[in-house]
Image: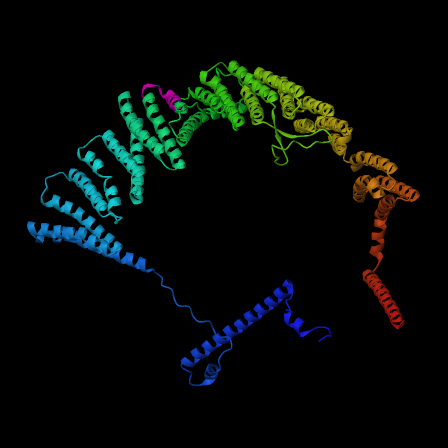
């Protein structure tokens, strides 16, 4: 104890550690407690294993006995008790249901088999007593809380009431019609079961059973009175209406489920029957009666949609109701209108659904009616699409009958390979009507652009099929398609509103950040622009195919399309310029081919005329400043050049001229700084032109084909080394020299004359001397190698003659000596390496 500290001071002091230290101490103590608890649990498990081993019978002898006496350190865990595979309520329900089924089978067997062994009084007494007991038994069972048992017994009682009704008919009323009696019996049973279920509110079975039985009385009654199809259909729809009312008003869930299933089942059956009656109606009277049935079905569906609690179900029911209404009204119109006006009549009824507006209808019902109207319009458009397909695909047959003569009218022009569909005279009206509806119904909102694009496509389809539908003259149809092409192309050209695309979302409340330079916004063409441009191209193709029937029409159409697309490409500055320029050049290529064919030129002569297009494309590409139109123009020009080469392929002299002209065009393109790589294509074209010309002259010397490549390649290599002295000689001169030296060397080895080896050797000597003077490796290696091989070729006969005089054992002996020399040299190097290693090892 240090001096100066009193005992009173020591008593008042408490040694409390800091919070962090105290937390560390607590964690340490808890870990020790956990470790101790784990040890105790392990010991407990071991003791349980020892006890189980002591209770088990020990083996009589052997190692098994010794192992049984020695308890294991880690005993197996105690087995878990098995869980029952079935729950007690499940077993109870199975037993009750099985008992009820057996009692029901017994009652049926008694009624059908053992009925005749008793008298009238006995029969009545037995059935009455059993039925009363079965229906009364659930009362005390419910009081005792045995609800499941009460349900089973009640189900037996309900079945017994059906047997009572059957027995009553067989004994007391055998002369009554069975179907009529069944209608009355099912109605009475439905009422009695409903009253029984209401009196015993705890039972779940009677009320849904009564609802299921209530589906039969009306249908059985109309069948019993031998009513017609209209009456039976009305009975089905009335039953569906009753089910709908019950499903929307009764609070009991089981009853609602049965009523909903009944409403959908009987309603669907009734709608199908009414639709069949409307389709089979031959006059306005029958159609009106079928329409009345369909109107009843539509009223049921719309009423259910109005009162349906779920919005999705309400929309679906309203959609169904709207379609049924259209079918009802359209069926009446179909009976009084020609067959061609059936679809327009239904379309008119579908459009009328859009006029149903008002605040007294929920929004879900409005949505369903709009969907039903849209469905009717979609079906009408689908009906007209086959005619549009015939008009588009039919003129393709003129490709096999080019310039065979103009047809009499537009319908004959489009049906050259496909027949005309019947009763489609009103298809243009349907397409135009749907287009107008799209414009008027969706003139505002986020989907306006898509709706306008669809309307434009439908209007285009209507105009496309109109000449053939009206059987206009052939020239009138061509003019109509030409005007349509011009209009759609103009719409695409002047409706270039672009949609900006941002890199990410920004807050509308935040102002745009200031920028130091001009802002650039990524834009894309609007759907209307793309649609109009696509329709213009499709119409122009259709017009070209249709014009193949007559020579004058083909030339006029191709010339007009070339001028039209060229004018749009010149006046526009946005994305449409690329497509218009490419289309103009494509139609110009076709015009050149058609002009040559009209003048009775041969294909290789037409190729020279087609070359005007790639030349024009090269000149235009040099003047354009936008990359997209430039690329499209160049691609179109390249395709036209390939077509010219293909046309001249059968005439080698003209093919050489065409290749040379294509090389000139490519060389002119390569003058531009951004198209330097085209120079390789120009060189290849020039070489090909030279080769084709030499082949047409029947020149067989390889130097005639290789020198036109070698000389320009060496010139290019020389210029490159002048600009960049660091360029390797292999890069600058290797390709050019190899193109001539290697083929000439191969030809010289197979040549028995002396001029070719002499000239080749002289050229190789000059190349070697130049390489030695300029110290260029490529020239030394290629020239020297070629010179050595040429010399070897010249000495080959003398070497062969000398080898013939040498004994046969000399070559193997020389080879053996060579191998021995190589082995000795290899051994000497290994010995020198060992000496160096030993010297280094002694240097410590």
529 left or right of 363 in image = right
Q: Position of residue 169 (x, y in %)?
A: 12, 43
The residue lying at 28 percent from left, 28 percent from top is 293
Residue sitting at 41 percent across and 32 percent down? Answer: 364
Q: Position of residue 656 (x, y in %)?
A: 73, 28
Which quadrant of the figure has residue 184? top left
319 vs 459, left or right, is left
Residue 539 visible somewhere in the drawing: yes
Point out the stretch of residues depicted in magenta. 335-349
Q: Is residue 340 magenta?
A: yes
Q: Residue placed farthest to the right in the image? A: 773
Look at the image and say whether residue 660 sits in the magenta stretch.
no
For this rendering, which residue is in front, 652 or 51? 51
Is residue 751 visible to the viewer in this orientation of the structure? Answer: no
Q: Quadrant of the C terminus?
A: bottom right
Q: Nearer the viewer, residue 341 or 203?
A: 203
Q: Residue at x 36, y 21 (%)?
A: 339
Magenta span main SS: helix
In the drawing, does residue 495 fall left or right of residue 744?
left
Q: Residue at x 83, y 52 (%)?
A: 800
Horizontally, residue 763 falls left or right of residue 358, namely right
């Amino acid at each position: 104890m240090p001096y100066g500290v009193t005992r009173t001071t020591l008593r008042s002091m408490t040694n409390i550690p800091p919070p962090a230290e105290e937390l560390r101490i607590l964690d340490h103590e808890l870990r020790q407690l956990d470790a101790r608890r784990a040890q105790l649990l392990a010991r407990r498990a071991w003791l349980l294993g020892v006890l189980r081993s002591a209770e088990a019978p020990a083996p009589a002898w052997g190692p098994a006995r010794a192992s049984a006496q020695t308890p294991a350190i880690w005993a197996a865990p105690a087995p878990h008790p098995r869980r029952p595979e079935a729950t007690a309520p499940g077993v109870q329900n199975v037993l009750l249901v099985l008992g009820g089924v057996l009692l029901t089978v017994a009652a049926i067997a008694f009624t059908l088999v053992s009925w005749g062994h008793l008298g009238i009084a006995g029969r009545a007494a037995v059935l009455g007593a059993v039925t009363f007991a079965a229906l009364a038994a659930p009362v005390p069972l419910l009081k005792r809380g045995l609800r499941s048992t009460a349900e089973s017994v009640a189900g037996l009682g309900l079945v017994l009431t059906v047997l009572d009704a059957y027995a009553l008919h067989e004994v007391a009323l055998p002369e009554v019609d069975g179907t009529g009696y069944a209608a009355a019996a099912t109605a009475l049973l439905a009422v009695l079961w409903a009253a029984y279920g209401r009196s015993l509110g705890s039972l779940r079975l009677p009320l849904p059973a009564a609802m299921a039985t209530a589906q039969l009385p009306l249908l059985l009654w109309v069948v019993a009175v031998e009513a017609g199809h209209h009456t039976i259909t009305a009975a089905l729809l009335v039953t569906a209406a009753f089910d709908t009312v019950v499903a929307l008003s009764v609070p009991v869930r089981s009853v609602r489920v049965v009523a909903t299933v009944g409403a959908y089942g009987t309603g669907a059956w009734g709608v199908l029957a009414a639709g069949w009656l409307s389709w089979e109606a031959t006059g306005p009277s029958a159609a009106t009666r079928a329409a009345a049935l369909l109107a009843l079905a539509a009223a049921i569906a719309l009423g259910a949609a109005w009162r349906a609690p779920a919005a999705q179900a309400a929309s679906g029911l309203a959609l169904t109701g709207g379609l049924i209404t259209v079918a009802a009204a359209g069926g009446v119109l179909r009976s009084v209108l020609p067959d061609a006006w059936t679809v327009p009549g239904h379309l008119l009824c579908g459009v009328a659904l859009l006029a149903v507006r008002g605040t007294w209808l929920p929004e879900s019902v409005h949505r369903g009616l709009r969907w039903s109207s849209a469905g009717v319009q979609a079906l009408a458009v689908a009906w007209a699409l086959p005619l549009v397909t015939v008009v588009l695909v039919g003129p393709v047959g003129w490709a096999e009958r080019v310039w065979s003569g103009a047809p009499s009218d537009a319908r004959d022009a489009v049906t050259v390979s496909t027949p005309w569909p019947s009763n489609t005279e009103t298809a243009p009206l349907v397409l135009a009507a749907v287009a107008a509806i799209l414009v008027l119904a969706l003139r505002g909102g986020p989907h306006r652009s898509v709706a306008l694009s669809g309307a434009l496509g439908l209007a285009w389809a209507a105009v496309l099929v109109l000449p053939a539908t009206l059987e206009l003259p052939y020239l009138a149809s061509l003019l109509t398609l030409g005007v349509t092409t011009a209009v759609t192309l103009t719409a695409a050209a002047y409706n270039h509103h672009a949609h900006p695309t941002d890199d990410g979302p920004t807050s509308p409340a935040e102002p745009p950040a200031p920028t130091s330079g001009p802002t650039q916004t990524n834009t894309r063409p609007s759907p209307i622009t793309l649609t109009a441009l696509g329709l213009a191209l499709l119409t122009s193709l259709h017009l070209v195919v249709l014009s193949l029937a007559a020579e004058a029409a083909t030339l006029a159409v191709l010339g007009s399309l070339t001028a039209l697309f060229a004018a749009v490409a010149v006046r526009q500055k946005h994305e449409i310029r690329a497509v218009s320029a490419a289309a103009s050049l494509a139609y110009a290529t076709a015009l050149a081919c058609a002009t040559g064919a009209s003048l009775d030129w041969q294909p290789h002569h037409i190729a020279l005329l087609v070359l005007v297009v790639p030349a024009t494309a090269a000149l235009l590409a040099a003047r354009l400043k936008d990359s997209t139109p430039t690329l499209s123009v160049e691609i179109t020009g390249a395709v036209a050049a390939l077509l010219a080469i293909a046309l001249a392929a059968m005439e080698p002299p003209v093919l050489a001229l065409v290749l040379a002209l294509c090389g000139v065009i490519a060389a002119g393109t390569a003058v531009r700084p951004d198209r330097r790589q085209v120079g390789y294509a120009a060189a290849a074209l020039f070489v090909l032109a030279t080769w084709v010309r030499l082949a047409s002259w029947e020149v067989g010397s390889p130097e005639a084909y290789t020198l036109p490549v070698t000389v320009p390649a060496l010139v290019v290599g020389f210029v490159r080394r002048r600009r960049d002295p660091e360029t390797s000689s292999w890069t600058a001169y290797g390709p050019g020299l190899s193109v001539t030296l290697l083929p000439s060397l191969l030809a010289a080895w197979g040549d028995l004359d002396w001029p070719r080896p002499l000239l080749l050797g002289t050229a190789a000597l000059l190349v070697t001397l130049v390489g030695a003077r300029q110290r260029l490796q490529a020239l030394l290696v290629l020239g020297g190698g070629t010179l050595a091989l040429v010399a070897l070729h010249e000495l080959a006969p003398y070497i062969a003659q000398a080898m013939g005089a040498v004994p046969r054992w000399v070559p193997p002996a020389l080879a053996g000596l060579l191998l021995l020399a190589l082995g000795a040299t290899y051994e000497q190097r290994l010995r020198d390496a060992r000496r160096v290693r030993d010297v280094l090892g002694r240097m410590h």
